[in-house]
Amino acid sequence: MKIRVLGSAAGGGFPQWNCNCPNCAGFRAGTLNARARTQSSIAVTGRPGGATVLVNASPDILAQLQAAPDLQPNRSIRDTALAAIVLVDGQVDHTTGLYMLRESNRPWPIWCTDSTHSDLTLGNPVFGVLKHFCGVDRRRIELDVPFEIDTVGGVSWRALPVASKPAPYSPNRDAPISGDNLALVMTDEDSGRSVVYAPGLAAIDPRLWEAMLGAACVMVDGTFWTDDEMIRLGVSRKHARDIGHLPQSGPDGMLEWLARLPPDTRKILIHINNTNPILDESSAQSEELRRRGVEVARDGMEIIL
Ligand code: MLT
Ligand code: MN
Ligand code: ZN
């Protein structure tokens, strides 16, 4: 199994178009030791040369595909290596790319839970819009039930509900239900090794923790370093946990959890917000991650299991 990080940033990307936080301003001024990042998505390929699953459809999908020529194999006049789409939630940063993929020459097989399906038919009716273009071949994700994506061999999938937040337009925004947000456990059928991918995660429950303990690699919520990061910078009045993201630092933060994983588990933070000091590769926080053996996802990074 190969995972390509198409976009490693949270909603807004890095730098964010209207943001003058120290990271975004420093990047534009050329004074920050950091790389630009596009919005949250990964591509999962089971076997070499085989079909690929797009996990989340970012607003930046077209640039992400241009940066990944393998995903455009050119076998016919209209072609793509992408055979299906899996959505972990119905948030803007994970679904806006669906509009950009409307030229598909067949209905997109899109795997999502019932609650994400509601978000994308009621709150933000992109599935209805796509009916006027390529169409949607919706496949239901059942929680904690392993599934296969028929056109993509070599990987088995399992979705675990996680505590986070559905989008503001979700019918469940103020009372989240199980299935609004997912962690994906992807297992390589040849090696038996698995990856846990959870870009939005406010808390780690026993079922998710068990999956993380059994994984060769975890790619988990790296949105914010501190719970009050956006408040301190004056960019929002919301805490990280209020919008469904577990901060890295502090008691019960992500770093404490990652420190309890086996030493050979690969630990990667993904879905990084533009305000997060870990984007500055010279920051004390980046140094702390290096000391702890925790990696920060970059666009174009590939993980092979
Ligand atoms: C999130 O991960 O909290 C959302 O994607 C935020 C957003 O809509 O940009
Ligand atoms: Mn997001
Ligand atoms: Zn910023």
Image (spheres, helix red, strand yellow):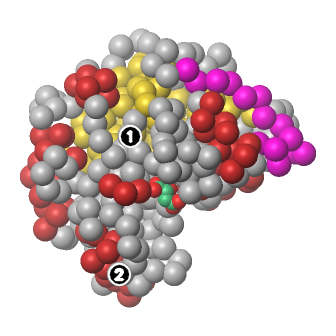
User: What type is the residue that disc 1 sits on?
Assistant: Ala
Location of residue 62 with respect to 199 vertically, above or below: below
User: What type is the residue that disc 2 sits on?
Assistant: Gly
Q: Residue at x 56, y 57 (%)?
A: 168
Q: Which residues are magenta?
A: 126-142
Can I make out residue 54 in this image?
A: no
Identify the element where label 1 is drawn: loop
Q: Residue at x 83, y 48 (%)?
A: 129
* For marks 1 and 2 on the same chain, the one whose residue lies earlier in the sequence: 1
Location of residue 266 with respect to 101 vertically, above or below: above
**Which quarter of the image is occupied by the N terminus?**
top left
Q: Which residue extends farthest bottom?
A: 29
**Which quarter of the image is occupied by the C terminus?**
top left
Q: Which residue extends farthest front?
A: 175
Can I make out residue 116 in this image?
A: yes
Q: Which residue extends farthest right?
A: 132
Can you tell which quarter of the image residue 76 is in? top right
Circle 2 packing at 10 Å, graded few (<14), some (14-19), many (20+), is: few
Q: Is residue 137 magenta?
A: yes
Circle 1 packing at 10 Å, graded few (<14), some (14-19), many (20+), is: many
Q: Which residue extends farthest left?
A: 291
Can you tell which quarter of the image residue 241 is in? bottom left
Residue 234: numbered disc: 2
In the image, residue 40 lies at what x, y percent?
49, 52
- Residue receiving disc 1: 163
Q: Is residue 172 magenta?
A: no
Label 1 with label 2: CB-CB less than 8 Å: no
Location of residue 37 with respect to 18 vertically, above or below: above
In the image, residue 279 lies at what x, y percent?
30, 66
Location of residue 252 with respect to 230 vertically, above or below: above
